[in-house]
């Protein structure tokens, strides 16, 4: 039996580039070479080494891309050479390098809901934790000034952020818990006191959370907004360019009607923030003793139909299970735990990261709203 011998001349960097130019990123629909996702190609008669730089550490298609690269090398370069692929990531952004506010934050994501009681803060908390578990640098702002939930959900209600001085100015240093940087009005006021402020005072506090806080480098900064459409929402879009918004709803009609108003706000021509997707929370109830059973307490597939109606991706259908509520109450998000609920949030993090990467590749930067609303 004759075995073809690999010669030094048969393996070149150009041959590797040509092979990898046939491998597409499944989300971005372009090849890895055109997308500049292949780095550090090194070839020898025995080994081909290169790095693939993914658009997020949460990429669920990592192994799909790796296998496609191996097949391309085998089919177009050599079947006998050893292939060493390093998979790494660099989260994409459309923000300009000279952005004065949050200059080192790549993506600002608004977590919104049309009405209260749909579990928006639970979603925001678990999503932040799940993103951080992938290796991303994540921050979470509790922008619900009058009803902050994040201190409780992260078990740090009695803690306070630090202060550092830069030049003549003091900056807030966010708390860090479970790999997520956190800031909430709940850290700055007594937990048993109500925040009784007019709208401008609440807006001023949110501006400080952006401009007077040392966030450092972040891949994703989630902003947990109050329900509805308010001064806080307008302050957000007027202060920073928002990468996109996600809308949290439950399946019943009353929640969907209010979610419709929230989407309409973000899609107004003078705001124009991309809506990245819908999260249907409390999609069904699953009792612990019957984990395979689903009871559609609030109606079935309302979020899915709503997403199709608005031509927006349905990012996840999160079940209503007791452990999610218990985990929030004790300050240990369910995303940190193994099991179906934790896996649901891990999958949500991957799906959202995909949508952000696609948005950044296909749409221009969102601009700050300059006009007075």
Image (cartoon, rainbow, N blue to C red):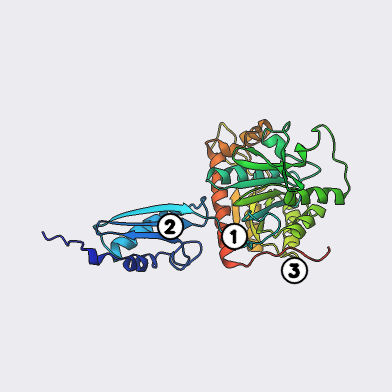
Residue farthest front in this picture: 167
Q: Is residue 335 above or below residue 355?
A: above
Q: Provide the residue designation for mark 3.
A: 269
Left or right of 112, for residue 93:
left
Q: Is residue 71 above or below residue 171?
A: below
Residue located at (55% from left, 48% from top)? 136
Q: Disc 3 to disc 2, how far (Cα)?
A: 38 Å
| Quadrant of the rendered image containing residue 51 | bottom left
Residue located at (59% from left, 52% from top)? 219
Residue farthest left in this picture: 1
Q: Is residue 95 above or below residue 156?
A: below
Query: Where does residue 292 sit, x and y in percent of width and height?
Result: 53, 39
Q: Is residue 156 above or below residue 226?
A: above
Callout 3: 10 Å neighbours few (<14), some, many (20+)?
few
Residue 19 can be seen in this image:
yes
Q: Nearer the viewer, mark 1 or mark 3?
A: 1
Query: Which of these two is toward me, 347 or 32?
Result: 32
Query: Which of these two is toward me, 307 or 6?
Result: 6
Callout 1: 10 Å neighbours few (<14), some, many (20+)?
many
Q: Provide the residue designation for mark 1.
A: 93
Residue located at (59% from left, 60% from top)? 93
Q: Are marks 1 and 3 in contact (CB under 8 Å)?
A: no
Q: Which mark is residue 353?
A: none
Q: Provide the residue designation for mark 2.
A: 52
Is disc 3 placed on a helix, strand or loop? loop
Q: Nearer the viewer, mark 3 or mark 2?
A: 2
Pointer 1 or 3: first along the chain: 1
């Amino acid at each position: 039996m004759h075995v073809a011998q690999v010669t030094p001349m048969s393996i070149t960097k150009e041959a590797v580039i040509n092979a990898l130019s046939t491998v597409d990123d499944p989300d971005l629909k372009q090849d890895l070479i055109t997308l500049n996702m292949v780095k550090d190609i090194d070839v020898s008669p025995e080994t081909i080494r290169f790095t693939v730089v993914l658009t997020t550490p949460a990429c669920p298609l990592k192994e799909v891309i790796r296998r496609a690269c191996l097949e391309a090398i085998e089919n177009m370069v050599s079947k006998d050479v050893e292939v060493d692929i390093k998979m790494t990531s660099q989260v994409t952004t459309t923000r300009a390098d000279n952005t004065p506010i949050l200059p080192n934050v790549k993506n600002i994501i608004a977590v919104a809901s049309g009405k209260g009681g749909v579990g928006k803060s639970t979603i925001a908390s678990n999503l932040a934790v799940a993103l951080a578990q992938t290796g991303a640098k994540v921050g979470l702002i509790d922008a619900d000034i009058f009803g902050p939930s994040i201190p409780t959900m992260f078990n740090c209600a009695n803690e306070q952020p630090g202060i550092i001085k830069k030049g003549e100015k003091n900056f807030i240093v966010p708390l860090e818990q479970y790999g997520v940087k956190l800031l909430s009005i709940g850290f700055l006021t007594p937990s048993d006191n109500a925040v009784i402020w007019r709208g401008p005072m609440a807006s001023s506090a949110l501006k400080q959370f952006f401009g007077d806080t040392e966030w450092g480098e972040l891949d994703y900064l989630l902003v947990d907004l109050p329900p509805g459409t308010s001064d806080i929402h307008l302050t957000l879009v007027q202060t920073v360019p928002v990468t996109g918004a996600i809308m949290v709803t439950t399946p019943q009609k009353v929640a969907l009607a209010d979610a419709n108003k929230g989407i309409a706000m973000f899609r107004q021509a003078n705001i124009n923030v991309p809506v990245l997707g819908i999260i249907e929370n409390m999609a069904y109830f699953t009792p612990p003793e019957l984990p395979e059973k689903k009871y559609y307490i609030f109606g079935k597939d309302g979020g899915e139909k709503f997403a199709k109606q608005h031509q927006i991706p349905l990012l996840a259908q999160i079940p209503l299970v007791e452990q999610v509520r218990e985990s929030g109450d004790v300050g240990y998000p369910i995303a940190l735990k193994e099991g179906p609920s934790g896996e649901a949030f891990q999958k949500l993090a991957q799906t959202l990261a995909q949508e952000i990467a696609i948005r950044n590749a296909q749409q221009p930067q969102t601009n700050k709203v300059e006009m007075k609303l």
